[in-house]
Amino acid sequence: MLTRPAPAPTDPAGRLRPEFVEWMQGLPLGWVTATPGLGRPAQLTALGNGVVPQQAREALRLLHPPFPRCPRCGASG
């Protein structure tokens, strides 16, 4: 859920801003961009390789089986 105004999508040179990507993914302000020592390229890499929490939650909800366990499955399976 987007709960704050969008930051500018690009910097003055026209490059994508990590703060905008962080916002688009619904992450808290500074979740990636306030990490000390993490430059712009590393921030974008982390954001690009990350999981969007809202999508992960929905995927788990959809994948959760709506039926009881198989009677032939063992207690550990």
Image (cartoon, helix red, strand yellow):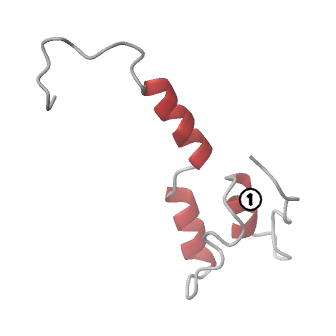
In the image, 66 versus 20, the foreground residue is: 66
In this rendering, the answer to whether 54 lies above or below 21 is above
Residue 21 falls in image quadrant: bottom right
Instruction: Tell whether 63 sits left or right of 35.
Output: left
Numbered-mark total: 1
Q: Position of residue 67 (x, y in %)?
A: 37, 12
In this rendering, the answer to whether 56 lies above or below 37 is above
Could you tell me which quadrant the C terminus lies in?
top left
Q: Which residue is mark 1?
A: 23
Residue 59 visible somewhere in the drawing: yes
Residue 33 falls in image quadrant: bottom right
Instruction: Tell whether 57 sits left or right of 65.
Output: right
Instruction: Tell whether 10 sits left or right of 59.
Output: right
Does dot 1 land on a helix, a strand or a loop? helix
Q: Name which residue lies at 76% across and 62% down.
A: 20
Q: Name which residue lies at 58% across and 80% down.
A: 35
Q: Position of residue 19 (x, y in %)?
A: 73, 68
Q: Position of residue 50 (x, y in %)?
A: 51, 57
In the image, 57 versus 70, the foreground residue is: 70
Q: Amino acid under label 1? A: Trp
In the image, 49 versus 26, the foreground residue is: 26
Residue 17 visible somewhere in the drawing: no
Q: Name which residue lies at 73% across and 53% down.
A: 24
**Farthest residue, direction front:** 75
In this rendering, the answer to whether 46 lies above or below 65 is below
Label 1 neighbour load within 10 Å: few <14, some 14-19, many 20+? many
Q: Name which residue lies at 17% across and 11% down.
A: 71
In this rendering, the answer to whether 9 lies above or below 65 is below
